[in-house]
């Protein structure tokens, strides 16, 4: 139904409806998503693959279970631009070696690793600002940019409701697959709120029940750990 500019139709005259939740987003949502996707990369560690993303021009974040140690870091490499173009053709990926001698910090309890990357790929691909000021609540929607099954970069942005939030984790229905570990989890403003790390039948924070969900480590918990380690300052 067409609507004259500057008018509001009465409810009985409206033939289009919101079905369930309001899934409308401003068109700029797409451009912001493309920008957020650029710093996301595929990680190869020996015969294993995962996902990571730049948080500075030459510093990457991923999971501890993707890169557990300095030795694994030395044997790791990343590929940027491993994705399809609008015609469905594979773009030209660009590969960089991981450099734990530049920077390295890992936490098994919070399942995250920060590691240096050779060169400054962030000058070309950008990086994702990480801070603790972005709230996340049950009922919010979260989008995940990832390399599932070691494939080209993909996005999960539907059926993506947040189901539980705890001090350290957030649980959601957003799809992931093996190889998605270490992917950034964004809210609908494309602000990072978590680091994806696992899925399946997992215990809900703040309760004893288990649910079939995916889960990420909250960025606030990661930043608190870095502050306590003397590697970041509290804003």
Image: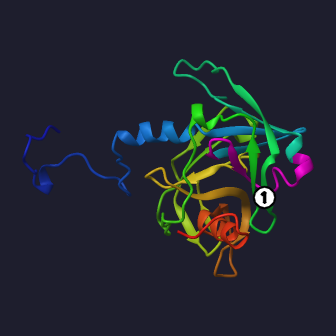
x%, y% of residue 28? 36, 40
Q: Residue furthest right?
A: 71
Quadrant position of residue 88: top right
| Above or below 217: residue 158 | above
Whether residue 71 is in magenta: the answer is yes
| Above or below 94: residue 22 | below
The span shown in magenta is 55-72
Left or right placement of residue 26 versus residue 54 in this view: left
In the rendered picture of this protein, how many numbered marks are placed on residues?
Answer: 1
x%, y% of residue 36? 52, 42
Quadrant position of residue 96: top right
The N terminus, quarter of image: top left
Say whether residue 175 is visible: no
Q: Residue at x 71, y 34 (%)?
A: 119
Location of mark 1 (residue)? 105
Q: Residue at x 64, y 69 (%)?
A: 221
Query: Which residue occupies the foreground of this view, 8 or 228?
Result: 228
Left or right placement of residue 31 versus residue 166 in this view: left
Q: Residues within 10 Å of mark 1 (few under 14, many from 20)?
A: some
| Above or below 83: residue 219 | below
* Colour pattern of the rendering: rainbow
Say whether residue 219 is visible: yes
What kind of element bears circle 1? Answer: strand
Query: Which residue occupies the foreground of this view, 132 or 8?
Result: 132
Query: Which residue occupies the foreground of this view, 89 or 44?
Result: 44
Q: Residue at x 69, y 46 (%)?
A: 59
x%, y% of residue 193? 55, 60
Whether residue 168 is in magenta: the answer is no
Left or right placement of residue 73 versus residue 59 in this view: right
x%, y% of residue 194? 60, 59
């Amino acid at each position: 139904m067409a609507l004259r500019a500057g008018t509001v139709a009465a409810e009985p005259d409206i033939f289009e409806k919101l079905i369930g939740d309001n899934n409308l987003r401003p068109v700029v949502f797409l451009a912001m998503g493309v920008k957020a996707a650029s710093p996301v990369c595929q990680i190869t560690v020996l015969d294993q693959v995962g996902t990571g993303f730049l948080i500075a021009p030459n510093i990457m974040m991923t999971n501890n279970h993707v890169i557990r140690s300095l030795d694994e870091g030395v044997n790791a490499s990343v590929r940027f631009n491993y994705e399809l173009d609008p015609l469905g053709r594979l773009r030209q990926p660009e590969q960089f070696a991981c450099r734990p001698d530049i920077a390295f910090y890992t936490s098994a309890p919070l399942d995250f690793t920060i590691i240096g990357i050779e060169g400054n790929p962030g000058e070309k691909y950008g990086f994702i600002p990480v801070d603790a000021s972005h709230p996340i609540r049950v009922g919010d929607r979260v989008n995940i940019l990832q390399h599932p099954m070691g494939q080209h970069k993909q996005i999960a942005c539907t059926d993506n409701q947040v189901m539980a939030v705890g001090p350290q984790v957030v649980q959601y229905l957003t799809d992931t697959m093996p190889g998605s570990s270490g992917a950034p989890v964004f809210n609908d403003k494309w602000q990072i709120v978590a680091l994806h790390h696992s899925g399946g039948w997992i215990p809900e924070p703040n309760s004893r029940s288990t649910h079939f969900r995916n889960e990420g480590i909250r960025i606030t918990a990661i930043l608190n750990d870095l502050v306590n380690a003397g590697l970041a300052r509290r804003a």
